[in-house]
Amino acid sequence: MEEVIVTTARNLTKIEIVTVEKLIHQRFSPTAALKLVVDPAVIGGIKLRFGSEEIDATVLTKLATVNQQLLKV
Amino acid sequence: MDIQLPQIIFQVINFGVVMGALTYLLYKPIQKLMDERASRIVEGQSAAEAALAQKANLDESKRKIEREAEKKAAILIEEAAKKATEIKREAVEKARVESQAETSKLKDQWQIEKHQLTQDMRQEMIRAVMTVTQKVIGVKLDEKTDAKLIGDELSKLMK
Amino acid sequence: MSANLHISISAEPVFHLGNLAITNSILTSLIVSTLIISFAVAVNWSLTIAKSTKKIGTLQNLAEFLVEGLYNLIQSVTNDHTKTRRFMPLIVAYFVFILCNNWFGLLPGVGTIGFKEVAEGEEQVVLLQQDLSLPVAQVQASETKPLEVAEPNQVSNTTTEIAETNVDSEAKSKSPVFVPYFRAGTADLNTTIALAMITQFAAQFWGLSYLKFDYIKKFINFSSPIMFFVGILELVGEFSKVMSYAFRLFGNIFAGEVLLTVISALVPLVVPMAFYGLEIFVGAIQAFVFSLLSIIFYQVATLGHHYE
């Protein structure tokens, strides 16, 4: 069974979990299971990983992007 | 007056004997001695003259050689001077070029280094800022904001 | 003092060698010749010594001075080195011989050391008694005929009283005459004639050897009558030259002797010194003159008649 890793900085609320499930069934696979990972290092936001596809909306990544942009200048 | 022939003849003989003795014992040896002396003097003089002439010749040739040597030396010196100037010029040129190259190289290097330094500094700064930001955001990011963040993100994704 | 003057114009015989009478002049000149020969031997010996020690002694110096001086003298006249060398031996001999003979006559003892000779069988003739108050000269004629006793008496008739007495005494007694052992060699006419003749013959010899037949032409010249007489005069001149040489030398030396004798007899101290000096000078001059005239004579003879 496919698994989707969901990384957040804190524990998700039930509402959030349902929303995430909905998104996953919509975007990736309707039968995918959820794996919830809590990683404070990401600071905030959410990161979804399904096989080789990843959606990263964590604050950390955003910071990293900003960093890169700064560096590019 | 008493002039007697026998006595005259006797005196002639007497004188003859004296003349013979004087000639062979005194005059001839002395004359030979004086001749030898004169010839030695002449020889000495001609030898001295020859030596003087030779010396004059040698002096002349010495002077000639000296003059030629001086000329040659002058030419050599001139050439050497020219060469020296040439070499100096070339050396100066080369040195200039080298120094220029070196300078530009250094400049480039400095540029690179500066760039590098700047980059490093920037990175450091950014890292520092990021770290601080991270820490600040980590501290400041509460549940509500985070939930909003997540919610916005999800909504975006679902569209 | 004045009575002791002894001056004889001719040389007196001292001894005899067979037929030849050896006079005091000849004796002296023999002694001088011996001295000259020993001088030559000494010079020769000193030359051989000098060759090994390389030092020149006084004798050699003197001899060189003599030879060089005479060489230059002859050279100045002839201007020809070969001629000078041919003339040199004779001229050196002349000069040395005459000089030594002249000077030897000035030595003390020459003319004063002698013996008293008694002339036997011969009269003694006193000359000049009429004119002088002093008996000056006594002539001893060895070959003259014995004079008559009457002659002195005749002479005494015209003389002064003193003279008469002297003449008488000398005519009657055979008082001894002083004969000196030594007398200057050149103060004898025989010697000087001998020298003059040698010169003359030498001149003729050299003239002939240099000019050959042309020399005879000097005397026998047939180109013109005048030249012929000139030739004869030349011939006479040759003979007269002999006389001139002989008498010049003899006269000078003999007169010097007489002068010295008279002055010494008159003033024996100091004054004769001046005359001795004069005589030394005269002796040297006469030797020089004889040599020089001989050289000139030879030069003229060998050059021929171009230089008249």
Image: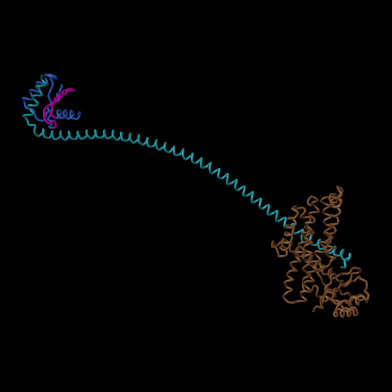
**Above or below for C143 versus B72:** below
Q: Nearer the viewer, residue C257 or B18?
A: C257
Residue A24 pos. (x, y %): 12, 21
Residue C21 pos. (x, y %): 89, 69
| Colour assignment, chain A | blue
Residue at the image point whose x is 81% and y is 73% from the top: C111
**Above or below for B80 versus C140:** above
Q: Is residue B32 left or right of residue C209?
A: left
Q: Is residue C72 left or right of residue A10?
A: right
Which quadrant of the view contains residue B153?
top left
Q: Nearer the viewer, residue B16 or C47?
A: B16
Q: Nearer the viewer, residue C138 or A8?
A: C138
Q: How is the image coloured?
A: by chain
Residue A53 counted in the magenta span = yes
Residue at the image point whose x is 14% and y is 32% from the top: A41
Instruction: Find the magenta span and give its range.
Output: A41-59
Residue C296 pos. (x, y %): 78, 56
| Colour assignment, chain B | cyan
| Colour assignment, chain C | brown
Q: Most extreme residue toward the front, as rendered? A: C158
Q: Is residue B108 left or right of residue C300?
A: left
Quarter the C terminus of chain A occupies: top left
**Above or below for B11 versus B135:** below
Residue B94 pos. (x, y %): 37, 35
Q: Nearer the viewer, residue C294 or B116?
A: C294
* Total marks in image: 0
Q: Is residue C230 left or right of residue B73?
A: right
Which quadrant of the view contains residue C7?
bottom right
Quarter the N terminus of chain A occupies: top left
